[in-house]
Amino acid sequence: MAREQWGTKLGFMLAAMGSAVGLGNIWRFSFVAGNNGGGAFLLLYLVFVFLIGIPLLLAEVSIGRKAKSDVIGSYQKLAPGTPWFLTGFFGVFSAFLILSFYAVVAGWSLYYLFHYITGDFFQAPAEGGYEGAFGGFITQEWQPLFWSALFMTMTIVIVFSGVKKGIETANKVFMPLLALLLLALAGVSLSLDGSMEGLSFLFRPDWSALTQPSIYVQALGQAFFSLSLGMGALLTYGSYLSDDKRLPGAAVGIGLMDTFFAVISGIVIFPAVFAFNIDPSSGPPLVFITLPSIFEQMPLGGIAGLLFFFALSLAALSSAISILEVPTAYFMRLFRWSRTKASVIVGVIMFFLGISVSLGFGIWSGITPIGERNILDSMDYIASNILLPLGGLSMALFVGWYFTKATALKAVDFGDNVIGNVWYGLVKYLLPVMIIIIFISSVL
């Protein structure tokens, strides 16, 4: 069977941006930045994106394009008879963990979008306000699972429609629309009295925050999570890219657009948070409790809330597509399944894994697999702080140490020049050292 390919280089870039731009840039970035000093965290995040993220993104895509296979098959093809293929399982395991909890949070977003469409959330519910509504919803047994199932169904349908007709077509619509929505919301947020304090929080670093070791771990984890690094999504997407499409420009473009979406999401959220004297370190509920209460107090806040949760749902869907594609591509090759069969089976398994995540806010709330972390936070910790960094480390070591220098440079369309040598030096030496140091810090 001939391997599917992207219709255009732009289609690949938009799909890769869709993979990178998701809940990680809006839901996760907002509360992680809020908990880690705002501007100081943003600065570290940007450093990691450009120093580690983009070079590693280029390495990951190059492995897939060179091998024209999935995250495990690529290593088997490029390094036959070696145990390198085992590193591909970091990506497959990460995909199952991440999408199982990702779909739960995305289901919350769909639930909010529905209630903004119907007008129910244009004002706070009479009993308990937005906090009561959110808590009452996520602690239920069945209703959150319905919305999670709906989200997974949408994701599966797009993935089994194919690379060109499904994934590429969807992202050609999603990404420009998402950018327009967030820019419009940023304009609304900046128009509020007191919004400049939020910009100051986001862009004026509190240097004392850099003395906390945890901020480095969080910033690297966020860079990996938001860029979809180490999971094999970009490797899999790269495998559908023809050899005549140059990689460096695409990789830089993807990194820049991911950074743009993270920053613009901060501009949407933090000026509004400060305009209404809300604590920016509100944590994960920031998007689902704090922002709706802000929208209620804003002129045309109901419309702003509708647009925000529409944007959040689009971002979640674009990323979920790439996550589901990782194991789908693997099982298609391994068992010779059709795309429809593979995506449905994998998606259903992920949904059932997500049931424990959803119940972890209700009847299973007493279960804390790692320390005091609930089921979702435990899965997030394993994926973001362990599996993704290990997956990224293995890719850097593979390209920097298994490939010869000439092979590595050719794989990413670099010549033996200054730019090529800088990239190769980063991947071969700096990236592994930095990832190992921060990885050790995160698990100690």
Image (cartoon, grey):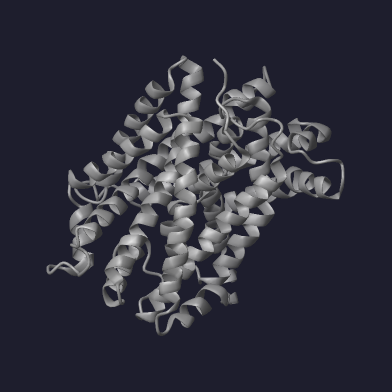
Residue 250 shows up from this direction: yes
Judge left or right: residue 369 versus residue 173.
Answer: left
Q: Which of the 4 quarters of the picture holds residue 291?
A: bottom left
Q: Residue at x 30, y 73 (%)?
A: 300
Q: In the image shown, does 68 or 185 lie closer to the viewer?
A: 185
In the image, residue 355 lies at what x, y percent? Answer: 27, 39
In the image, residue 346 lies at what x, y percent? Answer: 38, 28
Q: In the image shown, does 230 or 112 lie closer to the viewer?
A: 112
Extreme residue in the bottom direction: 193
Viewport quadrant of the N terminus: top right
Judge left or right: residue 332 versus residue 108.
Answer: right
Image height of 112 relative to 409, above or below? below
Image height of 401 relative to 439, above or below? above
In the image, residue 347 lies at what x, y percent? Answer: 36, 32
Image height of 98 relative to 302, above or below? above
Extreme residue in the left direction: 127
Q: In the image shown, does 381 or 400 lie closer to the viewer?
A: 400
Q: Residue at x 45, y 77 (%)?
A: 190
Residue 94 shows up from this direction: no
